[in-house]
């Protein structure tokens, strides 16, 4: 028999041992690799969770910031007590009304309202009662105007009312009489019935003035004339 045709058993055993060792090594490598990829997957899931949480927090912060900005915008536009427009915004509205009236060849009215005998409310019932009265007055004025009109608290117990696109003075007088009647209805404040009236000055654009400042001055003068005549009327 030719021995060259058969492998040496010792050599075969060595080869088998080497093969077994290589297989064990490969299994170990596979286990290590599997463990590595498992850890990577865990890290990725954790990173995704952290990213999702960060996005949620960012979204909540963005919503909160937008709400705060909107609130600040409202605070900058409205009187804190009466929720009517503040003076600066009202001046812008009057300026816009002037521009529109010029282009369309129309007219509008500006009313200057001052409450008669308002000071005794603060003196007799306290400033909180006076504040409540101003809130109720502003609500009555707001209820009387159209969506295209505007109301602002000019200061203290004074209000400006912008009536856009009016036809004539007679219509404005009719409106002021209706508004004056509404403002004279009794107010229930802190358990007391309080009565008020208002003196109202009227300025028409372009008949009486052509700028916001001069319109306010003209209406202010009309309001003082109404007070001098006993109040509770429009001039």
Image: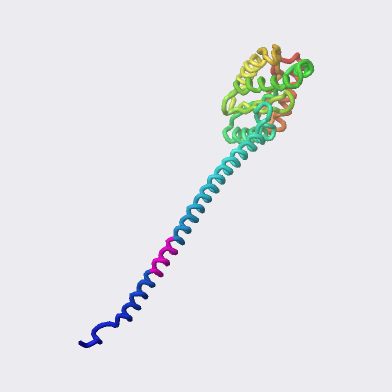
Position of residue 26 measured from the top left corner of the image (x, y, whole percent): 39, 69
Identify which residue, 176 or 57, lies in the foreground.
57
Position of residue 103 measured from the top left corner of the image (x, y, whole percent): 58, 36
In this rendering, is residue 188 above or below 154?
A: above
Query: Which residue is at a point 48% across and 58% down the rendered structure image?
Result: 39
Identify which residue, 120 or 35, lies in the foreground.
35
Regarding residue 104, the answer to whether it shows in the image is yes
Q: Does the magenta stretch mainly form a helix, a strand or a loop?
A: helix
In this rendering, is residue 90 above or below 142?
A: below
Query: Which residue is at a point 60% across and 27% down the rendered structure image?
Result: 149
Report the number of discs: 0
The reply, left or right, for residue 125 in relation to residue 173 is right
Position of residue 118 measured from the top left corner of the image (x, y, whole percent): 75, 18
Query: Which residue is at a point 62% across and 40% down the rendered structure image?
Result: 69
Identify which residue, 197 or 50, lies in the foreground.
50
Query: Which residue is at a point 72% across and 31% down the rendered structure image?
Result: 214
Identify which residue, 130 or 3, lies in the foreground.
3
Position of residue 105 measured from the top left corner of the image (x, y, whole percent): 58, 32
Regarding residue 204, the answer to whether it shows in the image is no
Q: Quadrant of residue 178?
A: top right
Residue 27 magenta:
yes
Residue 232 magenta:
no
The reply, left or right, for residue 43 in relation to residue 174 is left
In this rendering, is residue 197 above or below 67?
A: above
Write the start and end of the magenta stretch as one range. Answer: 24-34
Quarter of the rendering occupied by the N terminus:
bottom left
Q: Quadrant of residue 60?
A: top right
Q: Residue furthest right?
A: 123
* Display colour scheme: rainbow
Quarter of the rendering occupied by the C terminus:
top right
């Amino acid at each position: 028999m030719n021995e060259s045709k058969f492998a040496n058993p010792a050599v075969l055993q060595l080869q088998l041992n080497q093969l077994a060792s290589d297989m064990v090594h490969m299994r170990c490598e596979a286990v290590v690799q599997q463990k590595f990829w498992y850890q990577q997957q865990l890290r990725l899931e954790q990173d995704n969770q952290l990213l999702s949480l960060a996005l949620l927090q960012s979204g909540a912060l963005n919503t909160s910031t937008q709400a705060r900005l909107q609130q600040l915008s409202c605070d900058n536009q409205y009187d804190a007590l009466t929720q009517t427009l503040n003076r600066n915004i009202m001046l812008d509205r009057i300026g816009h009304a002037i521009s529109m009236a010029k282009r369309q060849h129309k007219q509008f009215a500006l009313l200057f309202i001052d409450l008669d005998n308002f000071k005794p409310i603060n003196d007799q019932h306290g400033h909180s009662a006076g504040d409540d009265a101003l809130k109720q007055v502003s609500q009555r004025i707001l209820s009387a105007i159209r969506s295209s009109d505007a109301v602002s608290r000019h200061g203290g117990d004074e209000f400006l009312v912008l009536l856009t696109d009016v036809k004539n003075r007679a219509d404005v007088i009719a409106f002021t009489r209706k508004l004056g009647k509404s403002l004279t209805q009794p107010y229930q404040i802190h358990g007391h019935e309080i009565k008020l009236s208002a003196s109202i000055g009227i300025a028409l654009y372009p008949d009486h003035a052509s700028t916001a400042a001069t319109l306010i001055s003209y209406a202010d003068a009309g309001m003082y004339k109404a007070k001098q005549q006993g109040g509770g009327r429009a001039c």
